[in-house]
Amino acid sequence: MKRRFSPYSMPPWLRTCRNACQQCIIPICIFQGIRTFFFPTTFDVLLLALLILIAVAFHLEWF
């Protein structure tokens, strides 16, 4: 059986860090999207894809 993930099983400092990252990831994605729109480099596109993947993981509560 698959065990359900509970954020309350984590230490308080890790929950605080996770919540701070969850709040900051969307503005960083928006900034990186604008930067990629004006100066598209391979690194910027890959970084934007990684940031979007992290944002989706937070939204779907994968970690």
Image: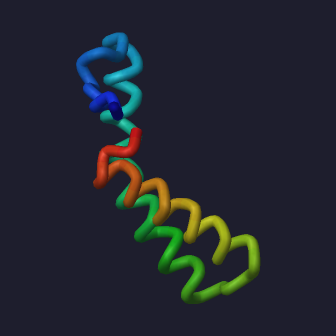
Q: Residue furthest right?
A: 42
Instruction: Say if 20 sits above or below 8 in the image.
Output: below
Q: Nearer the viewer, residue 40 or 12?
A: 12
The structure residue drawn at horizontal position 29% and vertical position 15%, both measured from the top left corner, is 9
Q: Quadrant of the N terminus?
A: top left
The structure residue drawn at horizontal position 55% and vertical position 87%, both measured from the top left corner, is 37
Q: Is residue 8 left or right of residue 45?
A: left
Q: Is residue 31 left or right of residue 22?
A: right
Q: Nearer the viewer, residue 59 or 25?
A: 59
Colour convention? rainbow
Q: Quadrant of the C terminus?
A: top left
Instruction: Say if 9 sits above or below 41 in the image.
Output: above
**Could you say where residue 10 lies in the image, as x and y percent from the top left?**
35, 16
**Could you say where residue 14 lies in the image, as x and y percent from the top left?**
40, 20
The structure residue drawn at horizontal position 63% and vertical position 65%, both measured from the top left corner, is 47
**Could you say where residue 22 lies in the image, as x and y percent from the top left?**
34, 44
Which quadrant of the figure has residue 59?
A: bottom left
The structure residue drawn at horizontal position 40% and vertical position 27%, both measured from the top left corner, is 17
